[in-house]
Amino acid sequence: MRRRNFLTASTGTTAAVAVPLIAQHHVGTSDVIRLRSGLDALMALDDSRGGHDGLERAALAGAAEALEKQKQGASQRIRLRLFSVAADYTATAAWSALDARQADRAQALLGKALYLAGMANDPIAELRVWNSYAMLAHQRGEHVEAVDSGLAAQYTTITRRDPLFASLAHARTAIGHSNLGDRQAALRSLGYAHEALGKASFAEHRPSWVAFYGPAELTAITAIVRDRIGDPAEAEAASHRALANIPKQFRRNLALATTRLALAQLHQRDVDQACATASTVFELMVGHPIPGRLRSLLGDYYRDLITLAPDASVAQEWGDRYRTEWSRT
């Protein structure tokens, strides 16, 4: 078995996540730990930069190795853990495609990840996949399917054991309801999400992919829901609270929350402030290409801007900046 490097970015930069393999040995816990550490490094890159081709390729390489190891005579317990690792790597690849707004590729990878999660009997991986399915459905404007995917996440067994995962599933469902214009259902699901998170212990060990979720992220989701059901002032207040608490290493999430803040300000007709806020997104992502999901959200902001204030000079200036930044990434 040759030495493999799981993380070579498409821009030519390399984040060192080398995973050396020792020639033929008994497959055991050390292999699982080593593969998991490579996955953690990929998630750290995603937190900073967002989804991109290099991350997706690295994740698929990790999944392939986990499945190869799974065939090498390990015990049943180790084999199940390797299926779980493969499911997480595949879900990471799917997430990278989703964040890059490569919907067809994301869907194919999510299907494979769900199969592997089932083979592993891993309800956390299953919840992760359904969470991503809900986001994919939103990207495609399939809001009923997004709600159904959120409900499927709620039905996974891990939500009965860990309220943090239950909270995430309810929050994702709330976004789906808000996109359907169902105010009551959206606020109800949001309430369940806050209630569940209040019961969660943050001392528990959980997979690195869910490190993004906590009070700050739920507040950012609250801002999304509030804006979509027509409460932009509440959305702005929630966005400010979220931005004050999202950890700095989650650069892409900070940029998304900042764009949401700009949208909430714009929807209150505070055009100057909204444009100033939206401009800071480019500084947040300086040095990195803007991921597809963030590019799309900035596009939503620009469309709302030229709809609400087509003749404002600040809108024209922001549009020039937007086009310049777009061409660079």
Image: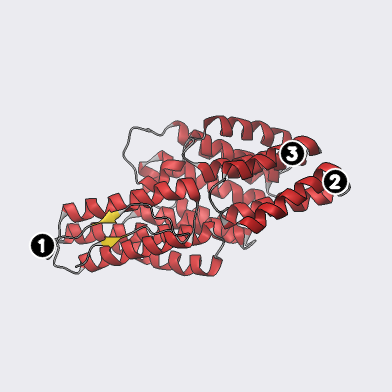
Alpha carbon distance from label 3 to label 1: 59 Å
Regarding mark 2 in the picture, which secondary structure is present there? loop
Q: Residue at x 52, y 42 (%)?
A: 251
Nearest to N terminus: mark 3 or mark 1: 1
Q: Position of residue 19 (x, y in %)?
A: 25, 56
Q: Is residue 286 left or right of residue 30?
A: right
> Within 10 angstroms of label 1, few (less than 14), some, or many (20 or more) residues?
few
Residue beneath label 2, please?
309
Dot 1 corresponds to which residue?
25
The secondary structure type at the circle numbered 1 is: loop
Q: Position of residue 35 (x, y in %)?
A: 26, 55
The C terminus lies in which quarter of the figure? bottom right
Are the residues tagged 2 and 1 within 8 Å (C-beta)?
Answer: no
Query: Which residue occupies 39% across, 56% down?
Result: 126
**Is 204 positioned to the left or the right of 228 in the image?**
left
Residue at 66% x, 58% y: name it.
327
| Element type where label 3 sits in the image | helix
User: Which of the two labelled residues, at mark 2 and mark 3, occupies the earlier sequence position?
Assistant: 3
Query: Looking at this view, is 117 or 211 the one in front?
Result: 211
Residue 84 location in percent, x, y? 30, 58
Q: Quadrant of residue 82?
A: bottom left
Q: Residue 211's mark?
A: none
In this view, the residue in front, 137 or 17, is 17
Question: Quadrant of residue 4 in the image?
Answer: bottom left
Q: Is residue 286 visible?
A: yes
178, 48: nearer the viewer: 48
Q: Is 70 located above or below residue 265 in the figure?
A: below
Residue 204: image x %, image y %?
Answer: 32, 36
Amino acid identity at mark 1? His
Local packing at callout 3 (Cα closer than 10 Å; few below 14, some 14-19, many 20+) is many
Compute the Cα span from label 2 to label 3. 11 Å
